[in-house]
Amino acid sequence: MGEEKKKKQSFTIIADDSTDGHGGYGGGSISLENMSAIIVDPEEDKAYVDMDAMHARSNIERRVKYFSDKAEVPEGRLYWIVWVTVERGEKGPYYAGVGASELLVDKKNKKAYKSMAEHVGNMEKSLKGKIVVDHMDTKSKLILKEFLKTFKADMWESSTDELKNKLS
């Protein structure tokens, strides 16, 4: 008997909403148009938007070999890639979903640790309006909070109490 070909599942990342009812190409796709990637660097006490992180091409992610075991990167510097989704509510736009994912980078030895499952899962949770920051250290949470507040103060004010409390 011949081996049956397995049908591969795939999804397409697109810029605009394809769910207009036509059911053609892009139907069932996911839009990342309202999502941004924020890098939190607790060692430098800063946070910044880096859209290249959406495709694992941020400056801190380049030119390193990835390992799925933290023990392989004992001298790794901690960063957080935070997936932030913006929605529009009654009061205007607000930070609706926030999913933080750990990244350890040892540039000197060209090694890094990241769990792709964690990154993809937290990205999806952010898109669904969930707040996933409990595993972050206190310093990193405060850096993220200050960044979100100063980046767009009106969006911070319109955000949920859950987000504000979890980052306090």
Image: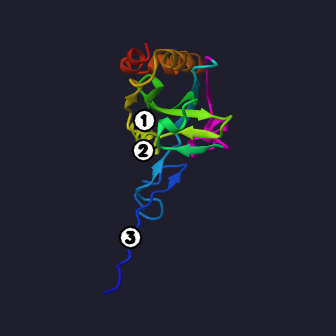
- Three-letter amino acid code at disc 1? Ser
User: Tags 2 and 3 in contact by the CB under 8 Å rule?
Assistant: no
Nearer to us in this view, 159 or 38: 38
Nearer to us in this view, 28 or 133: 133
* CA gap, disc 2 and disc 3: 22 Å
Closer to the eye: label 2 or 1: 2
Query: Vertical placement of 151 versus 56: above or below?
Result: above
Q: Quadrant of the C terminus?
A: top left
> What number is the disc on residue 117?
2
Q: Residue at x 35, y 85 (%)?
A: 2
Horizontal and vertical percent position of residue 77 = 59, 28
Residue 112 appears in the picture as rendered: yes
Closer to the eye: label 1 or 3: 3
Q: Is residue 49 magenta?
A: yes
Query: Vertical placement of 62 versus 100: above or below?
Result: below
Which residue bears the numbered disc 3? 7
- For the residue labelled by badge 3, is the local secondary structure a helix, a strand or a loop? loop
Instruction: State which region is magenta.
Output: 45-63
Nearer to us in this view, 131 or 158: 131
Q: Is residue 22 magenta?
A: no
> What number is the disc on residue 126?
1
Closer to the eye: label 2 or 3: 2
Horizontal and vertical percent position of residue 160 = 39, 21
* CA gap, disc 2 and disc 1: 14 Å
